[in-house]
Amino acid sequence: MLDRDLVLEVLRAARARGGDFAELFVEERSSVQIRLDDGKIEELTSGLDRGAGVRVARGPSFGYAFSNRLERTALLEAAAAAAASVDGVGPGAIVDLRTAEPPVVHRAESPAGALPATEKVRWLREVDDAARSFSPHVRQVVASYGDSVQRVLIATSDGRLVEEERPRVRLFVTVVAARDGVIQTGVHGPAGLAGAEFFDRHPPARTAEIAARRAVTMLDAVPAPAGETAVVLAPGMGGVLFHEACGHPLEADLVDREASVYRGRVGERVASALVNGVDDATVPNAWGSFSFDDEGTPAGRTVMLEEGILRGWLSDRIRAAKLGEPSSGNGRRQSYAHPPIPRMTNTYILNGTSSAEEVLASTERGVYVTALAGGQTNPASGDFVFGVSEGFLIEHGRVTAPVRGANLIGRAIEVMSAVDAVADDFDTWEGVCGKDGQGVPVGSGSPTLRIARITVGGTGA
Amino acid sequence: MRELCAAAVEAASGDEAIEAYAEESRRTEVTALRGEVEGLTFAESRGVGVRVMVGGRLGYAYVADPDLDEVRDAVAHARENATLATPDEHNVLPEASSAEPIAALFRDRQASMGADRKIALALELERAATGTDPRVRKVEQARYGDAVSRVAIASTTGIAAEYERTDCWCAVVALAERGDETQTGFSFRVGREIDELDWAGVASEAVDRGVRLLGATKPPSARIPVVLDPFAGSSFLSVLAGALSAEAVQKGRSPFANLVGERVGSDAFTLVDDGRLLAGPAAAPFDDEGVPTERTELISAGTLRGFLHNSYTAHRGGTRSTGNAHRAGYRSVPGVGASNFFVPAGTPSVHELLVRAEGGVLIQDVSGVHSGANPISGEFSVGATGLRISGGALAEPLREMTIASTLPEMLKAVEAVGSDLRFFTSVGVPTILVGEMTVAGR
């Protein structure tokens, strides 16, 4: 993307005043977004983004400057601005750049960018038809299709040179159902680090049906019971909980700021012995995967919880150095416009040995959660909350009436310690995680699991 | 930027309508940690987004920092995209009309300020937050940021408008600790220039909000009076802004559809959107498609008056735009969005509100609003922290509770609005006394 000599020149300018390391991140991203709403193809957008960010790190501090011009003068200006934040003594060395081999490559077999837009419009039409024919109660269908290719070049003063192409596709469907004045919505949005072949495994019509089923099911929902109860999470949903309750507090910037409920607890039991949790950027073609993180560290797999014992953090270079460890390869950024920070990739709770049927059948009373609307955690106190977008009552081991307006609230360690059953039917859930104003694609995953006691917020008795 | 916009508009052929939106910004952000600069970020960016409409079909394309040829390429892409879109007679560009400039949006002194002063502020902010109370020795975050930005819009309908602005903000998340327990306290302020930020007030408020939660317990579930402090209230207002956009209404996604002229809130509840209110952070002379901003009363003493409109929804609804076209930047087509969206201040003091809510709870923060509130049905259930109200004062802290209701029910239950109106990014709200709500805990 950039001439090697220019890369070296920028790195030299960035190290003019020393510091621990300098880094150049160059990005070009082309994207297509198509939106169907109210039966109409409302919006087709094509975009071209590009820019470069230069970072200079010294101890716990860094300077970052970026520009969306890629010519020499703009890059050197950014390098000088980043360098100026370091009160170092003199120029630092640049180790000769060596191209790094990726530990895993996520290829698009059928690059989405090469397909005509008419094909993508056809998928959206299929979504609209499938959702509307699912039930007469379906009132509105909104479907967003997006594909993008992000090309990055990352070079560091300690000799890393990485180039990667990240193809992404996503179809996100929202269905609104209404009956007798009751309005409910259902969503589904599978996504991958892949090409158009992704839609062979996730046919648009099926995505539409899942969203429609959720909306229509919830029309019959009764108010959720408020108070403490057992909760069974359907496959994938436990991963969302794990992401919020454990993943965020295990990001090393929060650990370093002593703003994590898990600080100083490596080696301790912080969850039920049934819980094995990992963050894995190497899962082939998964939404949160990559070959290298946004600092050029090869993708890796980090064990976070092993049989409930806390094993490790998710770190970027600066935080890893402060904690005296190698980076776990979790330095990510939304784009060139953002400095990297520790982020999750694909965060999974691994399969246990129970069957989902056993888990449900052995639950006398509780709530069965089949879709979560996302959540929020306070990593320092460990308090978290999730909205339940599709849930049911469990009565005498059987799944009965759907419930609405429910959310789950609790504290990370207590709730993860209350997991008393983990099944063997692992599945994933894709989302975009926001932190410090940066959104990055993340995957979550888990089998069916049960939390013996958790607070459910709702309006029912 | 004018040249770039003009190049796009000149590329129009036949009966095409074309609009170009260009945006340029320079940002600085400083974070402080343990007495040192943790991060210092300088950013410069520029981009152009082009709308092409032909025969009611809309196509869009954007490009970062383009030259004139790349702008023309973007026009060609947008034109190509338009061919696949469904024709919609309401795809129209607004006619040119002159927007009164708001001179005080741009402050020379702020635009030309060096980094040293900004770094000093971030360091001061952290020092003030960690040096006043023995229970707060560290922050999760102490941050100063600012932006100098310029927007230009030109169109084949004769719009050629431009304005510039300065914005700055500071934020603190204080960590209050006692034994094994940690609570966080958040505060922030926005302004046009650094002297307006009252950083010392931000630091002490963050400390206070963290410390007062120490020892918090989970309350028993009950229906009790609820007081929303402005931080908590602002989260609900953001959801309300979405539900009161004509876009949501026209697409059948608002609980307020078909209710204009009807009572949707109590007498105590009024809601205004005012893009020209200088005290509001979102003030601008014109909206994101060049229509002059104005003051719109959406709810007057409980009665729904209307919705927020851009040119598309206005045309479709047979009305005029309220100057509420909103984009997330040059990368996006204008939708409908609030400007300064606020509940005007009432007369009671916060103390008077607390007296009236005896035995209830002051909600200090809500979480999970975006996942827990459904703007379509208006139902919500969110996590909350707060304090018990006893004897007209704040008593023991509470955590791990949830509050649940529907937006329409909550608006009708509003009993009084305090005098302490405060703006957060673009929503502004005073302390609000809501009647009884379900507060779920143990």
Image (cartoon, helix red, strand yellow):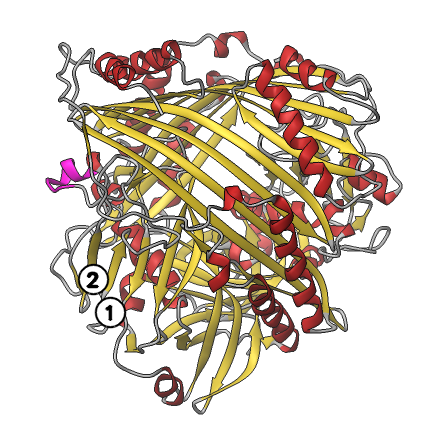
Q: Is residue B19 left or right of residue A60?
A: right
Which label was assigned to residue A60?
none
Mark 2 or mark 1: whose residue is earlier in sequence: 1
Pinpoint the chain carrying mark 1. A
- Viewport quadrant of the C terminus of chain B: bottom left
Q: Secondary structure at mark 1?
A: loop
According to the picture, the residue beneath numbered tag 2 turns out to be A305
Residue A154 at x, y percent in the picture: 28, 30
According to the picture, the residue beneath numbered tag 1 turns out to be A275
Q: Residue at x 46, y 77 (%)?
A: A368
- Comparing B23 with B408, the one in front is B23
Residue B334 makes an appearance in the image: no
- Comparing B11 with B32, the one in front is B11
For the stretch drawn in magenta, the main secondary structure is: helix
- Comparing A298 with B374, the one in front is A298
Range shown magenta: A319-326
Q: Amino acid at mark 2?
A: Leu
Q: Is residue B275 left or right of residue B428?
A: right
In the rendered structure, are the residues bearing label 2 and label 1 in contact, judged by CB atoms less than 8 Å apart?
Answer: yes
Q: Quadrant of residue B156?
A: top right
Determine if the magenta segment contains residue B105: no
